[in-house]
């Protein structure tokens, strides 16, 4: 059951009283919160009255100190907390329309060794702060934050982030939100782990909170999620789910996702025809007839529509699928398609499947590069606060030079910083990172995730954008200025690198590349053969 | 997954076309408990079939998409051999990019001793030499170690000895022909353009840290593939063929090759000479150069260089893999020579004596080889190992080991890779002139 909004204060007072009656340490807990200026805004038992969910509004000094959202969720269990209780709490976090801090849960029970038990619980999804219950006295919540928040590496996140976790993309989100609301079809391109899925999710989550709840499995057997203001009906499909790359699986899986969304909107879905493409057609028609809302279909990893492993051809009959979507988009102005991927080449090909390319002139291309410097700084600083790090100016500058603002690489640097503080005492005050950032930078290059990202970037360029690869490697081995003598700032090869955010700067004379790539190329990339060097030198006068 | 579907959801066995994410989602709804998908031997699916389709890549990427959407209630684990490296592709693999890679590292010595504990209980006098022998033969690979211990355990009539280890690992290729074949096949996959093996050879050729330029040169000028030096090093580490002992970005790179029967199988090309002694000499030198470059496995910081028997065991296995018939500690005229070597079907015989510099009667090595020289012997070799030889070891060796008798010493004209190499001639008591090749091998010292 979702936490209801408490209008009258008497209702909250009644809940407080009930809470203190049911939970033996409830009174002590509430007194401790009040002593720290933490305000109880909501309290509600779950279906079992010994399990309570409380919403707490933190004073600004605690928010600032630890980089939290204004409100956090507290799970209180009489007895020993179970994994299912944590699941219930997580569902609550996502139901509450992101006012709560999605990455933070405070857990209180009165059984011994709460911290150890929480540590061993499966399915950890954020920072869990144990707050052992006691009738006599309880440690203050800020002290518990100080002790336990640094024990979870909040930087180490490789999955797409949601809610407040999406940092530094406000302009991109605003732009995409406006376009999707106007049913424009968009291609969002960029390197892996640059945040494409997170950004598009932020847009569809805002426009369609119901799809957000559905995607995070926020509904439980105890009740339905609240209906929120839906401005777009959003459906997502990761194209890799069609693992056999058959048109049939692609269509049936997409149709199933559209059906789910329409059912959640209260539509009655007719019996499906045998032909899956026809089914998609029918579902779109139903949407257009039964609602005035736009329909947004998101195809993540769209590249796999056009190429599988080992250079497999496009999914059969893909042009027919795209023509269907384009037809509806043009006819109704209420269907938009968002594709997410790394290679926009299929957009530019004149033909697909032997037919004129339906994507030509239809999609708007948007490149998502690394975070702008001030946004990258914000990411590192905000997450640093959560784990007790005071990110200094030297650290920020070093991080930016290393990563160029690539979000995952920036996070990995933060993780490396955190590792270097593992020896500090628990419950210590925030640690300034400038004294250890250089040592952290050395370890940063050694991290498996960092090398994996660099490897992926170079492999993508080497196999699909050879000229860009050559320019980047040349720049890494000499300098960007030197490389730009042979391929101009506006050449296709360099423009591709700029789109990917691998050549940074606003002009050739200020061009730079992330230091992590420079180091990686020099350390691990093979030297060109004599014949290729000679070939390249013929073309561009480059020889090393 | 079809079985899971049938068991938990009651779906018919033939419902194989259910989308993995849909299946997992329904299972979570029906059961509520987290799901962990474990795929063992996953590398079987990570190579391409005849149609060029890589089933494993597509499946794991699809499962990873499902895991991401259903996180944190679904976890995915794939265990397998080296072919798991084949999961990558030009668009990048979701699974690879998010997965934590956990290589199964070679056993530590303490772990080997723990595994061997039942043998120690049965045979309390079991010495460290047996563990040393197991270590260099198995490369501390868990499967090879277990194999060796199993052979020792099964041989209940006899106490575990270095001889038993030699016999066990000599028979390994015949008992499990697929093991080594599959091992090298993964490293020899055509899509890898020989990169891992060339990097390994480059490492083996160096004693001590390897200049990065050597490694990058080893992989230069290849066709575009998914493997760079970082990949090659990871793959070789996962194969148990090397150990990286410091930052991967260091130059030179602190990397050392690991000794094992698998590494012995890839010795460099042999001499094509028809003459027995020339061929045996060339093969012995190749083997000793190999031991010298991989030799850190023969040194223990606490006890120093391993026993002679461990070296002679390695020589036995190596020579057998090169096609020679080798008999260990064969009784000769004056006692036991370490190795007696013959070419299959031929009468020519060579003998090898192994010593550790500074131990026992190392100074009498030349006389001992002479004493073992019977009528059928046509060549003899004296091999001396040391982890801390004196400066100007060859001169010291001549003075200590070859000066007491009337011996002509002439240097070998061949380029020197070993620490020392020369031929010394003398006469047997009955007047026969013999020439003994003396080979000095320096074992590098390294902490394990």
Image (tube, coloured by chain):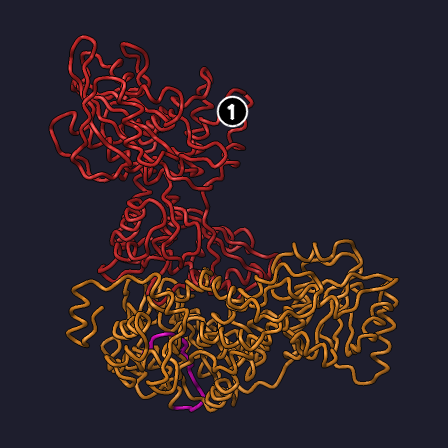
Q: Residues within 10 Å of mark 1 (few under 14, many from 20)?
A: many
Q: Is residue A322 above or below residue B218?
A: below
Q: Residue B324's x, y, as percent?
A: 23, 26
Determine the image quadrant of residue B271: top left
Determine the image quadrant of residue A251: bottom left
Placement of the N terminus of chain A among the 4 image quadrants: bottom right
Q: Is residue B62 visible?
A: no
Residue span colored magenta: A331-344
Magenta region includes residue A272: no
Q: Residue B396's x, y, as percent?
A: 31, 30
Q: Is residue B127 above or below residue A182?
A: above
Shown in orange, the chain is A
Q: Residue B269's x, y, as percent?
A: 20, 39
Q: Residue A12's x, y, as percent?
A: 83, 79
Placement of the C terminus of chain A among the 4 image quadrants: bottom left
> Is A175 or B374 nearer to us in this picture?
B374
Q: Is residue A178 above or below residue A234?
A: below
Q: In the image, what residue occupies the spot 37% across and 69% down? A: A518
Residue B410 shown left or right of residue A447 in the figure:
left
> Is B129 or B426 nearer to us in this picture?
B426
Magenta region includes residue A343: yes
Shown in red, the chain is B
Q: In the image, what residue occupies the spot 43% across and 41% down? A: B446
Determine the image quadrant of residue A325: bottom left
SS for callout 1: helix
Q: Is residue B273 above or below residue B208?
A: above
Residue farthest toward the top in the current orientation of the protein:
B430
Residue linked to disc 1: B119
């Amino acid at each position: 059951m979702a936490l209801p909004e408490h209008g009258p204060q008497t209702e909250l007072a009644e809940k407080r009283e009930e809470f203190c009656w049911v939970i033996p340490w409830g009174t002590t807990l509430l007194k401790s919160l009040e002593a720290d200026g933490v305000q109880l805004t909501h309290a509600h038992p779950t279906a079992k009255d010994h399990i309570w969910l409380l919403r707490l509004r933190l004073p600004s000094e605690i928010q600032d100190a630890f980089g939290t959202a204004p409100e956090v969720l507290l799970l209180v269990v009489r007895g020993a907390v179970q994994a299912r209780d944590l699941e219930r709490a997580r569902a609550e976090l996502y139901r509450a329309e992101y006012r709560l801090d999605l990455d933070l849960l405070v857990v209180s029970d009165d059984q011994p060794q709460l911290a150890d038990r929480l540590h061993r619980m499966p399915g950890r999804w954020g920072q869990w702060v144990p707050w052992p219950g006691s009738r006599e006295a309880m440690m203050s919540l800020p002290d518990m934050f100080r002790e336990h928040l640094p024990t979870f590496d909040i930087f180490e996140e490789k999955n797409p982030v949601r809610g407040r976790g999406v940092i530094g993309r406000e302009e991109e989100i605003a732009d995409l939100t406006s376009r999707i609301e106007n049913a424009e079809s968009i291609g969002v391109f960029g390197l892996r782990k640059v945040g494409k899925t997170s950004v598009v999710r932020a847009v569809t989550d805002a426009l369609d909170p119901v799809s957000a709840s559905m995607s995070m499995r926020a509904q439980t057997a105890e009740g339905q999620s609240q209906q929120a203001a839906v401005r777009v009906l959003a459906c997502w499909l990761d194209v890799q789910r069609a693992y056999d790359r058959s048109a049939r699986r692609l269509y049936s899986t997409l149709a199933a996702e559209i059906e789910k969304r329409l059912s959640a909107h209260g539509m009655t879905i007719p019996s499906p025809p045998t032909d899956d493409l026809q089914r998609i057609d029918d579902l779109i028609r139903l949407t257009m007839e039964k609602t005035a809302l736009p329909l947004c279909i998101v195809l993540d990893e769209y590249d796999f529509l056009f190429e599988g492993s080992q250079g497999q051809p496009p999914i059969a009959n893909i042009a027919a699928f795209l023509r269907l979507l384009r037809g509806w988009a043009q006819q109704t102005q209420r269907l938009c398609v968002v594709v997410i991927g790394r290679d926009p080449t299929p957009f530019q090909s004149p033909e697909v499947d032997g037919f004129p390319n339906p994507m030509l002139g239809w999609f708007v291309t948007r490149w998502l590069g690394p975070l702008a410097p001030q946004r990258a700084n914000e990411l590192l600083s905000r997450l640093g606060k959560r784990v007790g790090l005071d990110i200094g100016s030297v650290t920020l500058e070093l991080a930016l030079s290393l990563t160029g603002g690539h979000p995952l690489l920036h996070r990995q640097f933060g993780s490396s910083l955190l590792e270097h503080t593992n020896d500090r005492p628990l419950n210590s005050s925030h640690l300034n990172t400038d004294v250890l950032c250089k040592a952290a930078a050395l370890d940063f290059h050694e991290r498996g995730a960092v090398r994996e990202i660099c490897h992926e970037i170079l492999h993508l360029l080497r196999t699909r954008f050879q000229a860009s690869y050559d320019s980047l490697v040349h720049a890494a081995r000499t300098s960007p200025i030197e490389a730009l003598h042979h391929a101009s700032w506006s050449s296709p090869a360099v423009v591709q690198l700029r789109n990917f955010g691998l050549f940074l700067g606003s002009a050739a004379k200020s061009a730079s590349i992330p230091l992590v790539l420079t180091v990686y190329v020099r350390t691990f990339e093979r030297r060109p053969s004599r014949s290729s060097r000679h070939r390249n030198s013929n073309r561009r006068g480059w020889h090393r | 997954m079809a079985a899971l579907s049938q068991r938990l959801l009651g779906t018919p066995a033939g419902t194989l076309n259910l989308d993995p994410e849909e299946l997992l989602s329904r299972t979570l709804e029906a059961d509520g408990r987290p799901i962990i998908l474990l795929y063992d031997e996953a590398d079987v699916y990570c190579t391409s079939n005849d149609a060029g389709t890589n089933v494993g890549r597509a499946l794991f990427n699809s499962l990873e998409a499902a895991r991401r959407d259903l996180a944190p209630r679904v976890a995915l684990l794939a265990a397998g051999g080296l072919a798991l490296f084949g999961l990558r592709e030009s668009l990048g693999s979701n699974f690879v990019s998010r997965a934590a890679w956990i290589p199964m590292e070679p056993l530590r010595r303490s772990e080997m001793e723990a595994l061997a504990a039942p043998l120690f209980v049965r045979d309390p006098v079991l010495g460290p030499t047996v563990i040393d022998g197991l270590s260099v033969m198995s490369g501390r690979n868990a499967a090879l170690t277990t194999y060796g211990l199993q052979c020792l355990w099964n041989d209940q009539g006899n106490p575990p000895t270095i001889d038993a280890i030699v016999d066990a690992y000599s028979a390994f290729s015949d008992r499990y022909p697929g093991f080594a074949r599959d091992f090298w096949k993964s490293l020899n996959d055509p899509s890898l353009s020989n990169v891992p093996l060339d990097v390994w050879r480059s490492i083996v050729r160096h004693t001590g840290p390897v200049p990065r330029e050597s490694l990058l040169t080893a992989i230069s000028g290849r066709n575009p593939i998914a493997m760079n030096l970082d990949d090659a090093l990871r793959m070789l580490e996962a194969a148990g063929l090397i150990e990286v002992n410091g930052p991967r970005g260091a130059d030179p790179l602190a990397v050392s090759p690991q000794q094992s029967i698998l590494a012995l199988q890839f010795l460099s090309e042999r001499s094509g000479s028809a003459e027995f002694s020339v061929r045996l000499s060339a093969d012995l030198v190749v083997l000793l150069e190999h031991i010298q470059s991989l030799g850190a496995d023969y040194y223990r910081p606490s006890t120093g260089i391993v026993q002679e028997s461990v070296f002679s065991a390695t020589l036995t296995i190596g020579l057998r893999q090169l096609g020679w018939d080798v008999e260990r500690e064969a009784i000769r005229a004056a006692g036991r020579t370490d190795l007696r070597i013959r070419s299959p079907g031929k009468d020519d015989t060579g003998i090898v004596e192994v010593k550790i510099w500074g131990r026992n009667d190392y100074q009498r090595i030349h006389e001992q080889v002479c004493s073992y020289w019977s009528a059928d012997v046509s060549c003899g070799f004296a091999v001396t190992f040391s982890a801390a030889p004196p400066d100007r070891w060859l001169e010291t060796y001549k003075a200590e080991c070859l000066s007491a008798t009337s011996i002509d010493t002439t240097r070998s004209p061949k380029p020197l890779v070993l620490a020392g190499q020369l031929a010394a001639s003398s006469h047997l008591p009955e007047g026969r002139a013999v020439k003994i090749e003396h080979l000095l091998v320096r074992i590098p010292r390294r902490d394990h």
